[in-house]
Image: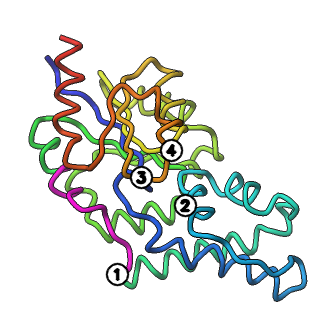
Amino acid sequence: MKPSTLVFDYDGTLHDSMYVYADAFPAGYQTLVDAGKARPRTFAREELERNLGLNVFEAWARLAPEIPWEVAEPAALHVKDVMLQAVAAGKARLYDGVPQMLDAVKAAGHTLVFLSNCATEYQEAARKAFGLDQWFSGYYNAQQFEYAPKEEIFKSIERDFEGPFIAIGDRHKDIALSAAHSLPCIGCLYGFGTPEELADATELAHAPAEIPALVARIEAARA
């Protein structure tokens, strides 16, 4: 059977994003406080974790719905800049076992595709920092597609790569992608999603090291 094309989410699936996000969002929000455009507040780690996997508009609407986007936009750009600086400074971290997992699925003949709700500049920073080109054959991000949902972006992946496809991610966005295109999906419980939002995944991974075997099990069920 032809090896699958694996469509990987990034934040919460490959990248333990809180190393670069935990300080970035509060720093961006503080610029609004300093400008008199927002009230002072603190953000619990759990609040920030729930933003990961959302696009920039959704993230701000969830944590600061009272602030119009035209007011929040400069702060959002500041968040991105702080994150990029952290990546450049070597503060970003892949989850333990991710390089070995990517080596394993690549060696098994699978094609790997990157699909994230991030901005292009962030994608390219990650690509450089972690040498992602040794594993990935294609890169797709929300900014490229005017922040369309993943199920819409996937139509381009489907044109560019041969199936069968398996979606791999940690949030409800990845489940929505798989449901929209009838794809099997591996839900990553070690990321930032809840068990409830991953309940409809085909398989569940408790650690990156489990993913190669789960891919093999999905393929065996297809045969």
| Disc ID at residue 191 | 3
Q: Position of residue 121 (x, y in %)?
A: 51, 65
Question: Is 111 above or below relative to 64?
Answer: above
Tell me if residue 141 comes above or below residue 3 in the rendering: below
Taking 91 as reference, is 209 left or right?
left
Please determine whether, in this image, residue 173 is positioned above or below residue 119. above
How far apart, in angstroms, are the residues tagged by discs 1 and 3?
Answer: 21 Å
Residue 90 got which mark?
1
Q: Which of the 4 quarters of the picture holds residue 159?
A: top left
Q: CA distance from mark 2 to mark 1?
A: 21 Å
For marks 1 and 4, give the CA distance.
28 Å
Q: Residue at x 58, y 76 (%)?
A: 24
Q: Earlier in the sequence, mark 1 or mark 3?
A: 1
Instruction: Indicate the position of residue 45 as horizontal and vertical percent values.
Output: 56, 69
| Nearest to viewer (mark 4 / mark 3) | 4
Q: Which residues are magenta?
A: 91-102
Q: Earlier in the sequence, mark 3 or mark 2?
A: 2
Separation (CA) of disc 3 from disc 2: 9 Å
Mark 1 belongs to which amino acid? Gly
Q: Is residue 156 magenta?
A: no
Image quarter where the N terminus lies is top left
